[in-house]
Amino acid sequence: MREAPADNIFGKILKGEIPSTEVYSDNHVYCFLDLYPQNPGHTLVIPRNYSANVVEADESDVFTCLRVVRKLIPAVKAATGAAGVSVLANMGRDAGQMVEYLHFHIIPRHPGDSISMYELGEQQTPEQLAEMAARIRAEL
């Protein structure tokens, strides 16, 4: 298993050095709520095996992440009342990749909303995150 560089925030989350709000976890992926979501329920899916982006990742890590993304989409939609979702994997700083670690965004979408991968959303409190994670897990 490849570990992330020591200063990588997602690597620190996986090691438990930085708290996160878990939505789903297994031996291959870890899924948690974005602390600065584009919309409430914005979920991140990361493989436990480090790679910087989708091109550098093992195919199996990409496929495993996408299988979990497919599993989470209905739960995120139901928990948030979203009309749809955006699924994104940015590659490179200029494309909005803020953390150099392969990850997929599941962003609940509502009529008339606006998202930006270049700006952080409104920071959520631990209570807001815990309540949303519980709602999503209940839909799984």
Image (spheres, rainbow, N blue to C red):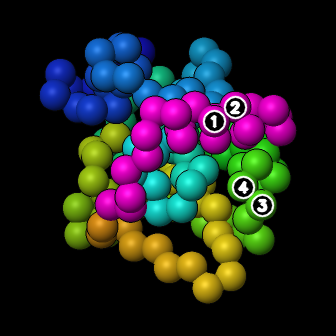
Position of residue 85 relative to residue 19, above or below, is below
Looking at the image, tell me whether mark 1 or mark 3 is earlier in sequence order. 3
The numbered disc on residue 134 is 2
Which one is in front, 80 or 65?
80
Q: Disc 1 on helix, strand or loop?
A: helix
Kindly report the secondary structure that dominates the magenta region of the rendered protein.
helix
Measured along the vertical axis of the image, is residue 124 above or below residue 126? Answer: below
Asked whether the beta carbons under mark 3 and mark 4 sit within 8 Å of each other, the answer is yes
**Quadrant of the snapshot with the C terminus:** top right
Give amino acid for label 3: Gly
Please state which of residues 59 and 3 is positioned toward the viewer in this rendering: 3
Image quadrant where one finds the N terminus: top left
Residue labelled with disc 3: 81
Label 3 crowd (10 A; few <14 / some 14-19 / many >=20): few
In three-dimensional space, the C-alpha distance between marks 1 and 2, rounded to whole angstroms, equals 5 Å
Would you identify the image quadrant in which residue 20 lies? top left
Instruction: Specify the label residue 80 is tagged with.
Output: 4
